[in-house]
Image: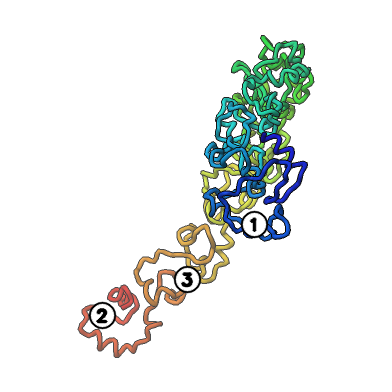
Amino acid sequence: MITLCAVIACAIPLRIQGWNPERGPVVPHDSFPGDCSLCHVTDDWQTIKKDFTFDHGAETGFPLVGAHQQAECLRCHNDRGPVELFSQQGCSGCHEDPHQGRLGTSCDACHSQDNWKPDGQIVEHAQTRFPLIGAHATTACFACHEGAEVGNFQHAPLECAACHRAEAERVRSPDHAALGWTNSCERCHQPTSFKAVRFDHPASFPLRGGHRAANCTDCHTDGTFSSLPTDCASCHREDYDGASDPNHQLAGFPLDCARCHGVSRWERGRFEHDSFLLTGQHTRATCNQCHDNQVFAGTPRNCDGCHLPDYERAKSPDHVASSFSTDCMACHSTQSWRTANFNHSIFPLTGKHSALDCSACHQDGVFAGTPKDCNSCHSKDFDDTRNPSHASLGFSRNCESCHGTDRWKGAVFNHPFPITSGPHKKLNCIDCHKDPQDSRAFSCIDCHKHRKSKMDDVHKEERGYMYASPDCLRCHPNGR
């Protein structure tokens, strides 16, 4: 009867409150109010007033929600019997169950009152043994459930092959049918994409680096997927034979490629060069730069074995003329040939000396026997100095007794008397040492101009007093 009503509703369009005699007698009015004008017009008994309103929720306690708001009154209120009997049965009181009870009685688990279309079936499907993931979430229900069109969702198989066997049999790279790979698709495939293959390769040969991106048939060329050799040369012999930098065959390199190469790429192999540690610029050199004759055994490990031309070309200083050792590591590192660092332990290079070129001291290109005393290089500086005159005062030519290696000016002399503090600290040597021919002679009374008669009177109680500079210093060693 419900199906029949649905057909009539489509064929005979009526207003919500309309009534068509072809549907049978109208519902009895014995329980309705006696004032007919509340609902009907006065000209026609069958026409309902246009401004008629009825609050179904307030009047009956059953509010009309969603599509029920647009349903004709007689769809529920008809001659089948009291509507309360049907409403107590819930959805099944009015709607026939197309699933025949196989999905339970809770229609609202999939349907809403807005329309009959199901909603939330993916979430509901997650409670089953086959959650809808990836491409399965967009697949039509009837693609797996053959009776879905008539509400039958039972007995859908869980195995991949039940739906995908035809796809597996069509695959030719590799040939799944010939290899018997038409079951257990999940071993290699993901539900997001059939083409995205990920096989758990045996631990005896894990797929890493460049091997991960290779096709199965790149290694399994004959269609056989068991008992393949795992040595490098079985796949990479052509790469080995074609290598020219260096020539692997001529050098007699082993076929164990993993000794020099990784699985990420074939180029730029890395050999464990333990017999001659490669550091600095040596790490950037190609094998042929040292092993230019393609012979790798017996290659010399001393510096001049490769760098003798560099040694002979060096002119600042001239290594050959100076008879420098051919052990380049005595001055040079592997980082740079131009930056040399010689251990000048026989004469530590500090201050300004550290910035000098070798030829500044070793001017004749001879390094053995170069004098180490200051005067050998700084005799002219000594002779030209006038404040005070080093030469005329007979100063020692051991410059470091007053000077440091940072600069020539600003000498610090260790004065034998403590009269270099206070105001005396700012005096030049010549202020006290007036005689340029005698550095030991000094004068106090030339600066401190006291009258002799007055000083004699002040010091008359001092035994041995004399009006002379040595006596001033004897009693006033600090200038006070």
* Residue at image mark 2: 465
* Residue 33 occupies quadrant: bottom right
Residue designated by label 3: 437
Q: Residues within 10 Å of mark 3 (few under 14, many from 20)?
A: some
The one nearer the camera, 82 or 390, is 82
* Residue at 77% over, 22% down: 243
Q: In the image as oriented, which residue stretches furthest toward the top?
A: 227
Q: Nearer the viewer, mark 3 or mark 1?
A: 1
Return the disc, 3 or 2, that comes first in the chain's sequence: 3
Asked if residue 250 shows in the view, the reply is no
Mark 3 → mark 2, Cα distance in angstroms: 28 Å
- Contact, mark 3 vs mark 1 (Cβ under 8 Å): no
Q: For this rendering, which residue is in front, 175 or 357? A: 175
Picture coordinates of residue 217, whole percent (x, y): 75, 18
Circle 1 or circle 2, nearest the eye? 1
Please, what secondary structure does the residue beneath circle 2 have?
loop
**Residue type at tag 2:** Tyr
- Residue at screen point 31% across, 82% down: 467
Secondary structure at numbered mark 3: loop
Residue toward you, 155 or 116: 116
